[in-house]
Structure formats: structure tokens, C-alpha cells
Image (cartoon, helix red, strand yellow):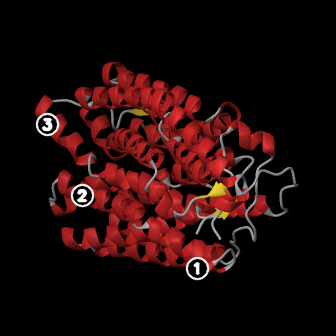
Amino acid sequence: MSGTSSASDAPMPAGRWIQLWLGVACMILIANLQYAWTLFVGPMHTAHDWTTASIQVAFSIFIATETWLTPIAGTIVDRLGPSRGPRLAIADGGVLVGIGWVMNSHANSLGLLYVGAAITGTGAGAIYATCVGNAVKWFPDKRGMAVGLTAAGFGAGAALTIIPIRWVIGTYGYQEAFFWFGLGQGIVVLLISQFLRAPDRMIAAPAAVAARLHQTARSFTSGEVLRSPVFWLLYIMLIMVSASGLMATAQLAPIAKDYGISNTVLFLSVSTLSVALVVDSVLNGLARPFFGAVSDRIGREPTMAVAFTLGAISYWLLAIGGHSPWSFVFCAGTIFFTWGEIFSLFPATCTDTFGPQYATANASLLYTAKGASAFLVPLANVLKTATGGWEVVLLVASVTNIVVVLLALFVLRPLRANTMRRANEVQAQPQHRSA
């Protein structure tokens, strides 16, 4: 059953910024589940003699469960209502991420490591889906910026823990880092969850904003979304860009090692890899609200074109000129800055196109593309082995970004405009509205 959401010039509700920042805090607390993973790969390989490829399967499982199970969490959140849904989903997610990393600390077999990854991913996905769903519902007038800030917590939050985690791993072992950071993060998320809620009613953007961003006047159910060509085009585009970015995320430490600069000291005894990881996390986070806010002004598809063109250039630069410490930091940073925005642009585009009522579930359906892309990550190791270096991997990522630019401008933009026009025409006819 489809709901409605008409553009309005009514004032926005009070308290929405508090809800936004609570969501950002939750995302910060789960950021290193993904972005600090690369620090654990080498120590686990040394401790257990597991191959790097087999360890990275755990990363793929984490990404898959973090994404593919989110539609279930999103549907539950939407159905439980604005008060119970977000609170319960975040609380359960906090418990699961704590259990998952504590389990990783005791994993003495790949099988147990994979189970821990699945549990962690399930919890992180519930938190991610709920926080993004809340952001797009509370801020129809600044949807790109709001979901960008929320996603920034996930992208940049690891900057707060990269150096402490690396220090704990080096001083006490990776098991201790898994245990204490997992336990602490889980507890804090559980506490924050008690204050989260969604808006009591669907909030409409001002008419001028809705018109500029091609926002729909109705809300599509998940079944309707899955029958829409726009959704599947967005899905394919997200897989393509996400896969290239995840390869960089998961393989950054091996790339730095193979370039021979991983432990080169840049300043104050801080290594190239540590500096790169902190800079990457910050830029990855900044990209999300920055490009989200830009898209609120100039539109989603033009912003995609700008960001992904810069991304293509960044991969190419890392391939041909990223072999010195500072050039590596710069090139890796620009990659993360031009990749992280997919987690603001795509949810905002999805909710603009399909409406806010079922936004948590619908954005979660789109987010599963990240899970599909995760299984392409090990192919980077295969391609690197076959070619003897990372250059071909990075050039493939560059070309992929250019293809997505062309799809955004010449396929998605006209297709979405057409879909919005038809949906709004149907919405304007009372006899065609769903009961």
C-alpha cells in the first residue's frame, strides 16, 4: 500500500538535529569494523599462517551481511513505528557488534572468524540502515547533507581509533584490540539507542526543493521499488563504484607494503600507512556531507558526474605516481574523498525517487549492492598476482568510474525524470491513489 508525501512550505519539526547527531555518533562507533580491518589482516596471517585471501573472505562476509540483511532490519524498523523501530534496531545492533568482535578475538580457525564476521556485519547493518533511514526522513529539505553527515560518521569515525588500534595490536596483540574495542563500542551504542526515534509523520520538503531535486509526491512500497528500472540502474552503478572503493579500502595496507613505503616514517615516528589511513578516513567522511550538500543544490546526477570523474583520475594517479610516501598519502586520500560520497548520493537519490514512508527499507535494498560488490574485492588479489602489480587493478577501477559517469548523465538522469513525472501525474489523480 503506497503512502503519500506532498511538497510543503511548513516549518521543519524541532529536535531533528539532535536525532541526526545521535545517528552520527552511532555510525562513528561502528566505523572501524570496516575501515580498521586492514590493520588486522597482517597480524592474523602471521599468528595463524592463514593466507591473506582466506582472511579477506571474512571481510567479504562482513560486508555481505552488513548489507544484504539490511532490508530485513529496515522493514522491521518501518513497521515497528517511529518510537520503537529505531530504538530496538540500534540496541540489537550494538549487542551484535560487541559479540562479533569479541568472538574474533578468540577465533582460532577461519570458520570461527567467518562466524564472527557474519555476526558483526548483521549488527553493523542494522545500525547503518536505521541511522540512514532516520536521516532521510527527518531532512527532506537537506537530504543529501543529512545522510552525508550520517554516513560521514561511518567513513571518518575510524580516524579516531586507527592509531590507538594499531598501537594496541603492536603492543598487546590483535586479539586484545578486537576484544576491548568491540566490547566498548557495543556498550556505548546500546546506551545511545534508547534516545533514537523517527519523525511521527512524514515530513515534506518545500515545494521549490522538491521540484529542483525531482522528489516524488508519493511513497513507493518495496515491491514497487523492485519493479522499477531506476532502482536496478542505481543498483548496478552502486556495485561498480563500490567495488572499486572497497578494493582500495581492503587492500590499502598490502598496496603500501608492495610499494615499499608502508613503514616509512613521515613525521613524529608516524608511518606512511598510519598517516594514509587517518587522512583517508577523514576525507572519506568529509566527502559524504560535502557532495551530499552539493547535490542538494545542483542535483544528484551532476554531482555524481563530478565526483566519479575525480575518482577516476585519483585511481590513475595512484597507479602511475603513488610510489613515494607523500604521493601515496595524497593519491589514496583523493580516492577516498571521491568514493565515500556514494553513501550519501545514492540513499538521497533513492528516497527522492521513491518517497520517505518506506525509506529505511528501500534505501536498505539499494545498500545491498555494497554486499554484492564485496565479493569482487578478492579479484583484486587475483588480478594483482596475474599482472605482478597493483597498477592494472587501479586502472580498471579508473575506467569503471568513467562508465558510471556516463550512466549517471545519459541514462539515469532522463530515466529518473520520466519516472518522477509519471508518478506525480498519477498522484495528482485521486481515483488512482491507493487506499
Q: Which marked residue is nearer to the observer: mark 2 or mark 1?
A: 1
Identity of the amino acid at label 1?
A: Leu
The residue pinned by badge 1 equals 88
Amino acid at circle 2: Val
The x and y percentages for residue 124 are: 47, 66
Q: Estimate the spatial distance between the alpha carbons at disc 2 and disc 3, rounded to whole Å.
A: 17 Å
Which residue is the site of mark 3? Answer: 385
**Number of other residues with Cα within 10 Å of mark 1, as a class: few under 14, some 14 to 19, many 20 or more:** many
Q: Give the Cα separation between the discs numbered 1 and 3.
A: 45 Å
Tell which of 416 and 427 is nearer to you: 427
Of 255 and 336, nearer the camera is 336
Q: Residue at x 28, y 46 (%)?
A: 377
Indicate left or right for 42 with 86 as reference. Answer: left
Q: Residue under circle 2? A: 57
Q: Tell me the residue at 46%/54% (across/down).
A: 366
Q: Residue 321: x, y in percent?
A: 35, 19
Q: Is residue 187 visible?
A: no
User: How dense is the environment of label 2, judged by Cα within 10 Å: few (below 14), some, or many (20 and up)?
Assistant: some
Query: From mark 2 to mark 1, how far is it between C-alphas?
Result: 30 Å
